[in-house]
Image: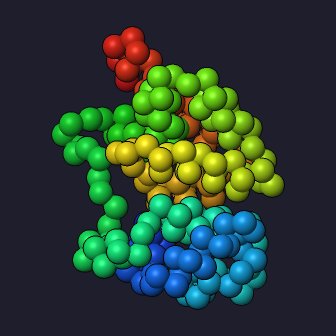
Amino acid sequence: MQKEITKAQAFMRHLRQRSEPADLARMRRALGDPGQEVIPVVEGFLGSIQEEREDHRERMVYYLVAGLWASTVSSSELEQFRKKPEEESEVSQSEESDVSKGYRRTLGHAIAQLYLARDQSKSIEQRFIALLDADEEQLPYRIRQMVRLLKSEEGIPIYWSELLRDLLAWDYERRPVQQKWARAFYRTVAKETEGGEE
């Protein structure tokens, strides 16, 4: 699993450092059918990590995350990313345990923040549950919807390397990613609404 984390962080650094405005437009267009359009900035990274035998599912996930990321980024932000190519840390290690910090970087935590910001909207929770139930075919559509909603709410961060790592493991047996997101969502909601311990 550690290798995937490293690849995910390297991919997001690659996008932040090398993307041009035209790449952002291509990545956004490719969201409709991830992996079908060739995007040089994405292929440049995949060429360095994939063996001769291509993993189609892995390629689709990289394209999906690139498109989602591009949908939240403006062309004017690209220069800032070149100066600071790493994602921000939300909390320091001294502030929280590793387990709690790990949950705070998941999309489940971000969706819980959205749910709370929208006065515990049932439709947000229903969309979240539908996302957790999504199969490989439904996943691109459902995650696009959720990222669009998150983007519309100020101040809710998406940790892209964590999202990429999770989506690469989406179809693992026993669904550990979906379970982690569900725990992050419901723990966050419980902590905020009942003053419970995380």
Which residue occupies the foreground of this view, 59 or 17? 17
User: Residue most toward the top?
Assistant: 194
Report how many numbered discs are placed on residues in the image.
0
- Is residue 99 visible to us here? no
Indicate left or right for 126 with 93 as reference: right
Q: Residue at x 71, y 36 (%)?
A: 130
Image coords of residue 89 (percent x, y): 29, 52
Q: Residue at x 53, y 54 (%)?
A: 163
Image coords of residue 153 (percent x, y): 43, 43
Indicate left or right for 101 with 50 as reference: left
Q: Residue at x 42, y 69 (%)?
A: 74
Which residue occupies the foreground of this view, 58 or 17? 17
Indicate left or right for 29 with 121 as reference: right
Q: Residue at x 70, y 56 (%)?
A: 140
- Above or below for 170 versus 96: below
Which residue occupies the foreground of this view, 104 or 122? 122
- Is residue 170 visible to us here? yes
Can you tell which quarter of the image residue 59 is in?
Answer: bottom right
User: Residue most toward the left?
Assistant: 94
- Above or below for 18 versus 30: below
